[in-house]
Amino acid sequence: MIAREHAEFQFGADASYDWCETNFFPFSVPEACISGSIYVLSRPKLGVAMVDVLVQDRIAPAWEAQAYVDNQQHLPCPTSLLRYAFPNGLAVEAVDPLSHYRIRYEGIDDTAFELDFQALMAPFDMNDPAIDPTAAGRIGAGWGGAAFSGHYEITGRITGRLRLRGREYAVDCVDTLDRSWGPRKERDNGNATWIHGSFAEKLTVHAFLGLDPAARSGFGPLISGYVLEDGVVSGLVSAQGAVERHAGLPMSNHLQVEDALGRRHELTAAAINGCVWAPFPSMVYAQSFMRWNCAGMLGFGVQQDVLSRSYLTRNRDALNGT
């Protein structure tokens, strides 16, 4: 079970040099085809951090073809994850850890944002069998090895403002942050698909799925996930579906899920922006922001196909043309 102290650094004196702690904060302005990703990766034993700020607004495979990219590595590692600021202009405050965050950024090219995240649920602990029905099968092994020995997700409402290259936008969306900690190497990591679809505060479907595109084009086995519906959270017990990709980017999908309460949902989605993102050195994220449909409801959220560079090069012939 996740407690307030898990919002703070979790490394100890005996942690290995490759101990990694991450924070991911999303936002979006769907009516303008805009989605944003804020990714902080800290290596506290080395005293360094990587910070990535990405704003997508079109379907374009190249990372630098998007509206805004600011990826900086080897920044000073913060001393706390409850309140920190980086030289690149990003500042984060855990006003109420796990429930309320304020995120500010002053970048270049007349780009800045001020965001407020308010949780709509308690943290979903993928490693707690009392919360996640799939956790028991992963205890002692853990998807992704020790890198995900600590991991949680929180769906919340994000409000605020975005100034993107001089143009102002209001931000008001529902999306999901996540956080991980544990030793994480920078070679031959595991693949996964990370999916989020929110239909305002009525319904969110979140799924973490296996990914092996060299062997199969559809979604892989369920790793973790949940449904948040009418304020009630329940872990997924099944998820399956199909994906269409172009040049590696998710373009459309069909997803069927069932949670532990027996609630079933069938969703379809189509990309409204997308690119290949690389915030972690040994991985690439084929990331598309999707327009979702579920029983006539319109929603939005990301599909991230997270792939190891080692996997991609090992399977380059099988993947050619996907």
Image (tube, grey):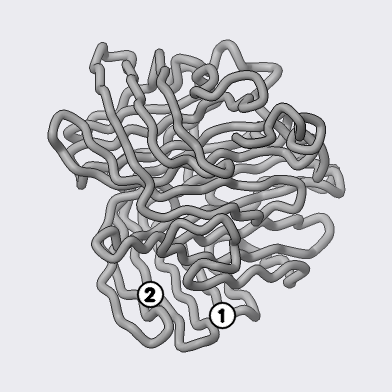
Find residue 4 and report its horizontal and vertical position in percent. Answer: 48, 46
In which quarter of the view is residue 147 placed? top right
List x then y, in percent, for residue 102.
40, 67
- Secondary structure, mark 1, is loop
Residue occupying image coordinates x 50% and y 82%: 106
Q: State whether residue 42 is above or below residue 105.
A: above
Q: Is residue 295 above or below residue 157?
A: above
Locate residue 19 relative to residue 117 in the image: left or right: right
Residue 114, label in figure: 2
Q: Which mark is residue 239?
A: none
Q: Quadrant of residue 199?
A: top left
- Which amino acid does the dot numbered 1 rest on? Gly
**Quadrant in the rendering for residue 58:** bottom left
**Residue 163 or residue 217, whichever sits in front:** 217
Q: Are marks 2 and 1 in contact (CB under 8 Å)?
A: no
Q: SS of the residue at dot 2?
A: strand
The residue that appears at 28% across and 58% down in the rendered structure is 30
Image location of residue 321, percent across then percent down: 63, 36
Q: Which residue is rendered at x = 43% and y = 33% of the image?
A: 124
Residue 178 appears anywhere in the view: yes
Residue position for label 1: 89
